[in-house]
Amino acid sequence: MHMLWSIGLVVGLGVIVIFAMRAGELFRLSVRDGQLLLVRGRIPGKLRAELHSIVLDTPIVQRGIIVAHASDGGARLSVHGDIDEGRAQQMRNVFQLYPPSHLQRARVDEDRNFGQLLGVTWLAWMLHNRD
């Protein structure tokens, strides 16, 4: 019984840590082979389209993550993966045109799959191809 409590405690703490890490996220986009998938949050359609056009510039971005975080007095964009610094700067420039209040009021996608609802990237991509 003591072992069960220990496992439960570790799992519970893990869930709390994950939610704490995601608390400031406005949205998270995943890039695979030039395709863009909203994993968490909400994003205005026009901003999403502009970021997608940057991802599709030659050469096409193969893998990457684009994350918007709320910060004091605004929001910031961070990129990871195969996204070079030139594209990252283009994305940040476009992102700065959208005030945080506009980002928070963006429409929520109604057709999210289970992976997107959970905010799990690999599951969102796996289920995205089956939609």
Image (cartoon, helix red, strand yellow):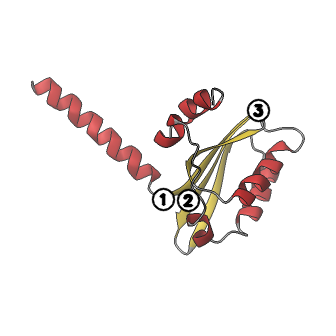
- Evaluate if marks 1 and 3 touch, with contact meaning CB atoms under 8 Å apart: no
For the residue pair 42 and 3, the one nearer the viewer reads as 42
Residue bearing the label numbered 3 = 33
Residue 47: horizontal and vertical position, in percent?
72, 59
* Three-letter amino acid code at the position of disc 1: Gly
For the residue pair 123 and 109, the one nearer the viewer reads as 109
Corner quadrant of residue 124? top right
Question: 27 left or right of 89?
Answer: left
- Evaluate if marks 1 and 2 touch, with contact meaning CB atoms under 8 Å apart: yes
Q: Which SS class for mark 2? A: strand
For the residue pair 81 and 39, the one nearer the viewer reads as 39
Disc 3 residue crowd, few under 14, some 14–19, many 20+, Cα 10 Å: few
Which mark is on residue 24? 1
Q: CA distance from mark 2 to mark 3?
A: 24 Å
Which mark is on residue 69? 2
Residue 17: horizontal and vertical position, in percent?
36, 46
| Residue found 63% across the figure and 32% down from its top | 128
Q: Earlier in the sequence, mark 2 or mark 3?
A: 3
57 over 125 or under it: above or below = below
* Three-letter amino acid code at the position of disc 2: His
Disc 2 residue crowd, few under 14, some 14–19, many 20+, Cα 10 Å: some
Q: CA distance from mark 1 to mark 2?
A: 5 Å
* Quadrant where the image shows the N terminus: top left
| Residue found 59% across the figure and 27% down from its top | 126
Disc 1 residue crowd, few under 14, some 14–19, many 20+, Cα 10 Å: few
Which mark is on residue 75? none
Q: CA distance from mark 1 to mark 3?
A: 27 Å
Point out the frontmost of discs 2 and 3.
3
Q: Earlier in the sequence, mark 1 or mark 2?
A: 1
| Residue found 76% across the figure and 63% down from its top | 94
